[in-house]
Amino acid sequence: MDSTDLEQLTDSQIVELARNGNKEAFGVLYQRYVQRIYSYVYYRVGNAQEAEDLTGRVFLKAWQHIERYEERGLPFTAYLYRIAHNLVANWHRDQSRRKEIPIDDTAWQLRSSAEQHPEHQLLEQERHEQLLAVIRKLPPERQELLILKFVERLSNAEIGQIMGRTEGAIKSLYHRTLIALRAELAKLEEKEQQPKQEHRR
């Protein structure tokens, strides 16, 4: 079976072949998910070279332990993200520092239509930047949750497996994170309103 035939298979079918030592099958999994894993790692470490190295290690580790992989109702990507999560955590420990997760503008692209009025686009961009500034103030764990939820678009169950928490704990953390975000945005709006009120006086 060549790579073209393999690409027609589902992840579960390809993983089964890889578990039996089929390197070409694992190569297809690599091609499917390397960009997503690199993106996740990059947002966590903020360095392209380190991200490339860690991404390579994620897939090497996945291949070395593929025969022990068990499908538990979650996609294969959850297994890859879990490995990446652990390697990034070790990387931060090795660096002896906790680095804020850099969430750049490419992670939170605004999907404005081409026909939208330029003034509306400008206002949306300003709001977008304000949101990013607030997100960057959150603890690294909460930033990671938002990356997995909105950038990687994973389910609570998948995020729970990656972060080593129950699905319920992820729901609770997500709820608290949204409350914190709303509170910070409300403070920001209040500050913006103050100059306008003073000007009216």
Image: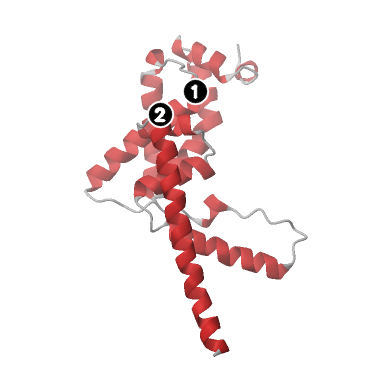
67 vs 42: above or below = above
Q: 182 or 70, which is in the foreground?
A: 182
Point out residue 32 in the picture as x, y percentages from the top left corner.
56, 29
Point out residue 70 in the picture as x, y percentages from the top left corner.
43, 15
Query: Which residue is label 2 attached to?
Result: 161
Q: Which quadrant holds the C terminus?
A: bottom right
165 vs 69: above or below = below
Query: For the residue marked with disc 1, what is the amino acid?
Result: Leu
Judge the density around disc 2: few (<14), some (14-19), many (≥20) Cα neighbours within 10 Å: some
Q: 92 or 138, which is in the foreground?
A: 138
In the picture provided, is 72 more to the left or to the right than 140? right
Query: Which residue is label 1 attached to?
Result: 74
Residue 181 sits in which quadrant? Answer: bottom left
Query: For the residue marked with disc 2, what is the amino acid?
Result: Gln
**Residue 42 appears in view:** no
Point out residue 43 in the picture as x, y percentages from the top left corner.
43, 48
Helix or strand or loop: what does disc 2 sit on? helix
Judge the density around disc 1: few (<14), some (14-19), many (≥20) Cα neighbours within 10 Å: few
99 vs 185: above or below = above
In the picture provided, is 62 more to the left or to the right than 96? right
Disc 2, disc 1: CB below 8 Å? yes
- Most distant residue in the right direction: 115
Residue 134 sits in which quadrant? Answer: bottom left
Write the residue at 69% across / 70% down: 119
- Most distant residue in the bottom direction: 201
Point out residue 183 in the picture as x, y percentages from the top left corner.
44, 59
